[in-house]
Amino acid sequence: MERITARYYIETPYAVEKAAAVLAGEQSSGTFVAVPGETEELKNQFAAQVEHIEHLETVSEPAIPGASSPDGSYRRAMVDVSWSVENFGHNLPTLVSTLQGNLYEITQFTGLKLMDIHFPESYANSYRGPRFGIDGCRSLTGVTSGRPLLGTIIKPSVGLTPAQTAEIVDTLAQAGIDFIKDDELMTSTANSRFEDRVDAVMRVINRHADRTGKKVMYAFNISDELEPMLRKYEYVLQAGGTCAMISLNSVGLTGAKRICDLGELAIHGHRNGWGMLNRHPLLGIEFPAYQKLWRLAGVDQLHVNGIQNKFWESDDSVVRSIASCLDPAPLGKPVLPVVSSGQWGGQAFETYRRTQTTDLLYMAGGGIMAHPGGPAAGVTALQQAWEGAVTGLKLEDAARQYKEFRQSVEKFGKLQFSRA
Ligand SMILES: O=C(O)[C@H](O)COP(=O)(O)O
Ligand SMILES: [Mg+2]
């Protein structure tokens, strides 16, 4: 029978083998004590198995509190555990409860992080994955190849009226932007009812599309409870929109999959809350595992932060995340990495140098909106930055060559987000 394998980075005050066995027992047929009915036959079919242990360093302080070590040592290891798909079939919430459930609470661990998941072949037959992905988003925006899709986030994030939002969209569309989105804080506010904003924005986008043949992709934030979220999706579709955004950690896998299954709009997955899941080195989940779950749900675009971002995440981590989005496994379809957070174009050079890809949605919110020449000049500066990066210019050369990009460098180039 096919099995799902999960890799965990663990820390335990006890023997690694014993702690791993507790994890496997607790997360399948067992509990803290042998129970009647847990026969050998039942265990053979349903017990999780520890497949591999790689011992790592031993430390004298626990990574997270909650248990003390009898000998003052905390042992770290990489542990692979497998489950038969018979335990849950193709049920994403139960998969998550199994791979990411109570095991985080077991006292045998003073650290536990889900690093990666390996899915069996049958998953590729049961989940469509991203309906649009990279190619679909390129064709919806008319950005063939050779450069990333360039986008922005409407800022101020909340507070603008639909008319004000539409006015900015008009300027951005005129300047040749590919993608615009609501901020994750914005769905419906007292002064910007969702439907009114869709009407006002789509009037502008459709008008530009009729004139130029290029339809700007606007990701309307439909995040909500299920019924209103479905109604919002339909509203965007009827207005001629091509994309909807959801805050993944807020709507959950079930909500995300329900939305993605509709398959008519590209789905922009915002991962706000990521720090809560990942920031501690020995707690939570790593991006290679995280992105596979959302890819199974069918998300087309997924946030990865950005090089020299305004948050805590390191450039190495961002580069790894981009690579895991572009890896076609497990469903044979990559998801479009969304580079966003403190971007203004200057990071295009290092992003391209380190990833050698333009299969990105590269977004600058403040970096476009606060350009000294206004948002239109901000769009131009981003286009210039990527043209420079892809043609092999250095940032300084591009700044000499392009006026709008030079203004960005003058304004944003001094910003340094301090990180450990
Ligand atoms: O939702 C996002 O991606 C952020 O609001 C990014 O905004 P910034 O480009 O101004 O950092
Ligand atoms: Mg935001």
Image: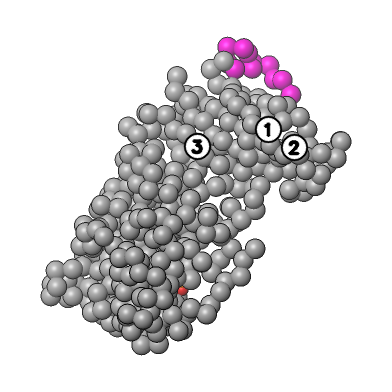
Which residue is at the far bottom?
373
Q: Earlier in the sequence, mark 1 or mark 2?
A: 1
- Three-letter amino acid code of the residue under disc 1: His
Residue where numbered disc 2 is placed: 75
Main SS, magenta residues:
loop
Mark 2 and mark 1 in contact (Cβ < 8 Å)? yes
The x, y position of residue 11, in whole percent, is 71, 40
Residue where numbered disc 1 is placed: 55
Along the line of sight, which residue is nearer the eye, 99 or 76? 76
Note whether 261 is above or below 167 in the view shown.
above
Residue where numbered disc 3 is placed: 117
Q: In the visual, does 22 lie left or right of 164? A: right
Residue for point 36% across, 87% down: 373
Along the line of sight, which residue is nearer the eye, 41 or 276? 276
Q: In the visual, does 359 lie left or right of 420? A: left
Along the line of sight, which residue is nearer the eye, 241 or 276? 276
Q: What residue span does the magenta drawing correspond to?
A: 33-43
- Quadrant in which the N terminus is drawn: top left
User: Quadrant location of residue 223?
Assistant: bottom left
Q: Does the image show residue 168?
A: no
